[in-house]
Amino acid sequence: MTDIKMNRRNLLTAGTAAGMAAAFGLPTLSDEAMAQAAGKEYVFLSIVTQVPFWVDYRNAMKDLEELMGIKATFTGPLDFDTAAQARQLDELIARRPAGILIFPGDPATLAPGVERAVEAGIPVTCCIGDIPGSPRSTFLGINGVQAGRVGGEMLAQAVGGKGKVILGTFPAPSTLERVEGYKQIFAEKYPDIEVVDVVNDKADPSYAPTAYLQAIQANPDIVGIGGTDGDSGKGAAIAVNEAGRNDIKIVAMDRNDDMLPYIEDGTIHGAVAQKSYLEIFLAFHMMHWQNTDALKVLPDWKAAGINPLPERVETGVMPITASNVAQFKHV
């Protein structure tokens, strides 16, 4: 275990930043830029922070603290409390960190705060979900519809291309886009698959099993469940076990450690995982580039009033199956 951790640390400090930057055609951190980064605080303002989904983000933040010499802070409401998230954004603006990365629960609620942050000179980026029309610099994450299409294809293959299915989600724009992706792929390629219910599992691991069990009982002839948030997979797996319905095929979302064993034992057919580590790794570097002279897009891009960063970075998804699930466990 020690050797694994040391090798990972050596890789990070020796070349990961340079390799990532080269892959995206972006500058590396020079010695001067590293000195400018020292001690600065970069914050990830999320929502529903109690769930295990955030482990990859937390791991990346620990690595970035060591790699960049920064302070990386993870915060946000424990539940899906969009008003509380907006209040926390205002509190962060008053604290004036070097940059804020946001997973927006409700884009409209957060948009005014993003305006105030940028006016205060704080770089803002978004991940997982975007805040359209706001002055945020960049969105990093998956294409929600495309991720849903990947999950829908996986579920269609598992159920043999026909039958009734239910989908699970919660009311965040990014997850609702994945629901639309499922529906799109079924309509285009699998007209014999019928979505009979869309379950709001509240992204709550304590509530999700009940939500799916009730949906199964209300629709006893379903053949599959497609989950679009990080807690849908385990919730659905517990529900099918309690109902004695292991014939129901499940496709989950993300790579939560408490969900992966259900892929190993066959209860869950597979999952679609975001590249969460990559999202925050790139986001913090991009915000730091905005705070230094590392970006040479123009002699003075601030005076020119332009955004030097890409408007969107689509990071893609990773399919998880029984054949590769061991690689997705956190060590």
Image (tube, rainbow, N blue to C red):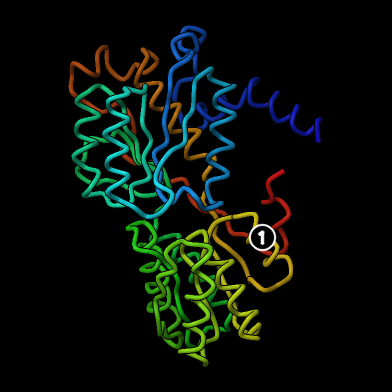
Along the viewing direction, whichever of 308 and 248 lies nearer the viewer: 248
Residue placed at 50% from the left, 12% from the top? 34
* Helix, strand or loop for disc 1: helix
**Label 1 Cα neighbours within 10 Å, binned few <14 / some 14-19 / many ≥20:** many
Residue type for callout 1: Leu
Residue 155 rendering spot, x and y as whole percentages: 54, 74
Q: Quadrant of the N terminus?
A: top right
Question: Is residue 224 positioned above or below 8 on the image?
Answer: below
Residue with the mark numbered 1: 260
Residue placed at 45% from the left, 61% from the top? 203
Residue 119 falls left or right of residue 207: left
Residue placed at 42% from the left, 46% from the top? 141
Residue 218 falls left or right of residue 249: left
Question: Is residue 260 positioned above or below 23 on the image?
Answer: below
Residue 205 rendering spot, x and y as whole percentages: 53, 62
Residue 19 falls left or right of residue 118: right
Along the viewing direction, whichever of 164 and 214 lies nearer the viewer: 214
Residue 69 rendering spot, x and y as whole percentages: 53, 17
Q: Quadrant of residue 123?
A: top left
Along the viewing direction, whichever of 266 and 48 lies nearer the viewer: 48
